[in-house]
Image (tube, rainbow, N blue to C red):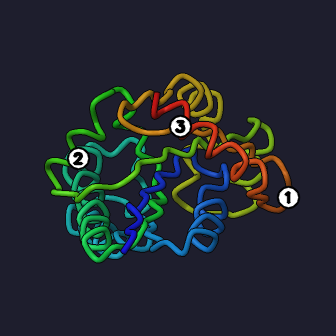
Amino acid sequence: MITTIPKVFIVIGPAGSGKSSVSQRIAQRFRAAYIDKDTAATGFTELLLKLNGSDPNERDNNEFYQTTIMPLEYATILDLTRDNLQAGNSVVLDAPFGKYFSDNNYLTKIRAHHKWPEAELIVVHVKLAGEALRERLISRGYPRDEWKLANWETFWAGAQANSCHWQGAIHIDFDNTASETDLTAFEAELPRQKASFAR
């Protein structure tokens, strides 16, 4: 019996770039479990922020969120990934991961810490031009985006400077400029990047 190694697609990009749309399409195409950090964590995140006397929507500049709650959010979705991999399911992770981009060995560390079984790791970099991204943030109207929009130059400069070079994974750029998410280019590029990664 031939067994297929499950995949973990880690879909990253700045807020408003369309990570969720891309993630959901990839999950549908590859019949993978879809894990959205917001869905998994928003309930306990907002409660913990309120209990700490903080604005439940203020996270970018909230030290308690950044140092205490956010690591718990990521631990939760990484443990859910392990559970799915152990069941033989591929996984799509929909989360920014921005704070961890500077650690090139991040993937090696989380695989060991969260006891992931063997899996093929694919990092999907969702790309969108700055003005288009700002318009999407305005359109979706999330309270947690208010700081980003009020401090747009600072936010966009930080998003541009914060690049991810994690080792131990295939990396693929995904241009999400089109109004509808199209996986054609992504599916064509995946085998090329897999072949290059295997060398």
The residue that label 2 is drawn on is 110
Where residue 31 appears, x then y in whole percent?
54, 75
Tell me which amino acid carries mark 1.
Ser
Dot 2: within a 10 Å radius of its alpha carbon, few (fewer than 14), some, or many (20 or more) residues? some
Residue 140 x, y percent position in the rendering: 69, 64
* Residue that label 3 marks: 171
Which mark identifies residue 170?
none
The residue lying at 60 percent from left, 63 percent from top is 20
Query: What residue sits 52% from the left and 46% below the top?
Result: 12
Image quarter of residue 141:
bottom right
Relative to 77, say whether 192 is above or below: above
Q: Residue at x 16, y 47 (%)?
A: 112
Task: Give whichever of discs 1 and 2 has the lower sequence position.
Answer: 2
Circle 3 sits in a helix, a strand or a loop, which is it? strand
Element type at marker 1? loop
C-beta proximity under 8 Å, tags 2 and 3: no
Query: Taking 68 as reference, is 42 above or below it?
Result: below
Image coordinates for residue 197, horizontal then vertical, percent:
48, 32
The image quarter in which residue 104 lies? top left
